[in-house]
Image (cartoon, rainbow, N blue to C red):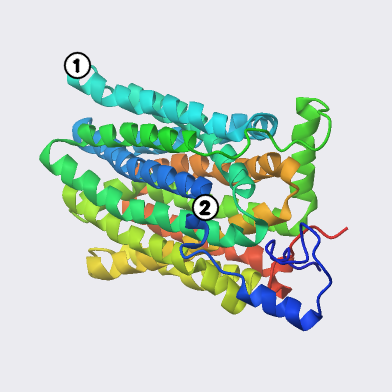
Amino acid sequence: MHTLSPDPLSPDQGVAEPEQPPTRRRLLRLRLPRPRWGVLGQPDFRNLWIGETASALGTAVGSVALALVAVVTLKASPITLGVLTAAAWVPWLFIGLVAGAWVDRWPRRTVMLVCDLALLALFASVPAAAWLGVLTIGQLVTVALLAGSVKVFFSTAYRSLLPSLVAKPELLEANVKLGAGESAADIAGPGLAGVVAQTVGAVTGLLGDAVSYLVSALCLLRIKAPQTPAEAAPRTGLRREIAEGVRFLTGDPLLRTLACFGAVGNLALGGIQAVQTLFLIRAVGLSPGAVGTVFAFVSIGGFVGATIAGRLARRFGSARGLLLCYLVVAPFIFLLPLAGWQAPLPVSVAGWSVAVCGVVAGNVIAGSFYQIYSPPEMLGRIRASSSTVNFGAFPLGALLGGYLGQALGSRATVWIMATVLLSGGVILLVSPLRGLRDFPGQRPA
């Protein structure tokens, strides 16, 4: 079992120095000043953080606004909502593996810039069509499908770019700050979407999503890290490179476990997301503005989860902290289907928020493990292989959720999907994770 890499600022690394007694060397390590703002003190990471937080705010507004446009403006059915939700995620099933191999070949920041501009155009087309009086469900589904395809490349490049901006020992802190920024955006975004929908219409909320991608692109342009792909070996053909990433993932018991658990979890979360807006509006009886407020409160749990992920990993160990998040905290999701029925809405929403806290904290820990554990030249392919399994399950869950919502109702669908989410814990309990305190720093030889 290997430990994490040593502190890159240690005096015994880099330029050689005169020999010093061990005691003094340890004192030098202790006296090295730490930047006041941590990794946010590094300009490249700060630009990434600002850009992606702004983008996350727009996405949070846009995702709620898109569902509200479908439900309130176009009177979508549960099956239609399932298709709309699935469209944003189904590209992972078809281009996820290819995207991973291509991202390992291309400059990752350039990939993200092109994706930002494409997303700006796609989401701006919705309010443009609405103002012209030609907006249809077909266009919403098309925008969701194309935007989902673009985000496959963006997400793969984004996760692969971070290790080139910060040192390995700083990856967990960097992921915590990125996760906290995204969760803070998730808090503000849904509430903002609800207010906009209540005052000037849900379609207008999508303008914020479009503009946010321009902000992200401008911030990416300010990153000065070298624009080179992480290439350490000659290229051997796209198909063979894809197979290498898949073999690395499936051949490693820890990565395989996380991928399988993620697939089950996203199957359940896709089903819940497909009917959650419909559930809150038609089963619980909330207004669009109140729906945005509920989503904002739930996102507070995500912010807390991202913030405490590092503390949990240090206090309990990274592997045990992940198990704590997924097995102890996530089951609070069972309070959600009781909303407005056998439990007051605030209690159900609080339980939903706690569950989201556990999911986000676990995701931050798992994401840091991937970045530390995977060979840099294969990181894009390994992450894409895992994401294809994880995110590929999401549209299946969304379609299943839409079907169940039409056949059984939205409340029954939430019950079923919450049960599926809890059942995924069995995968973790029978895996090698159960006996670990911390994840290894690299793959054993």
| The N terminus, quarter of image | bottom right
Q: Residue furthest right?
A: 445
**Residue drawn at point x = 41 percent, y = 30 percent:** 144
In the shown orientation, is residue 120 left or right of residue 69? right
Position of the C terminus, as image quadrant, is: bottom right
Q: In the figure, is residue 74 to the left or right of 179?
A: left
Q: CA distance from mark 2 to mark 1?
A: 45 Å
Q: Residue at x 31, y 25 (%)?
A: 124
Residue at (49% x, 48% y) in the render: 43
Secondary element at tag 1: helix
Residue labelled with disc 1: 132
**Picture quadrant of residue 54:** top left
Q: Are marks 2 and 1 in contact (CB under 8 Å)?
A: no
In the image, residue 347 sits, relative to residue 253, either above or below, namely: below
Can residue 334 be seen here? Answer: no
With 275 as the anchor, is 291 left or right in this view? left
Identify the residue shown where x is 22% and y is 63%. 340
Q: Label 2: how many residues lie within 10 Å, few (<14), some (14-19) or many (20+)?
A: few
Kindly state the secondary structure of the residue where label 2 is placed: loop
Identity, as a three-letter code, of the amino acid under mark 2? Gln
Q: Which residue is mark 2?
A: 42
The outermost residue toward the front is: 18
Of circles 2 and 1, the one toward us is: 2
Q: Position of residue 184 (x, y in %)?
A: 35, 56
Could you tell me residue 288's position as x and y percent? 19, 46
Q: Foreground residue, 334 or 24? A: 24
Say which of 423 and 385 sits in front.
385
Residue 261: x percent and y percent?
A: 61, 56
Characterize the local packing of mark 1: few (<14), some (14-19) or many (20 or more) Cα atoms within 10 angstroms: few
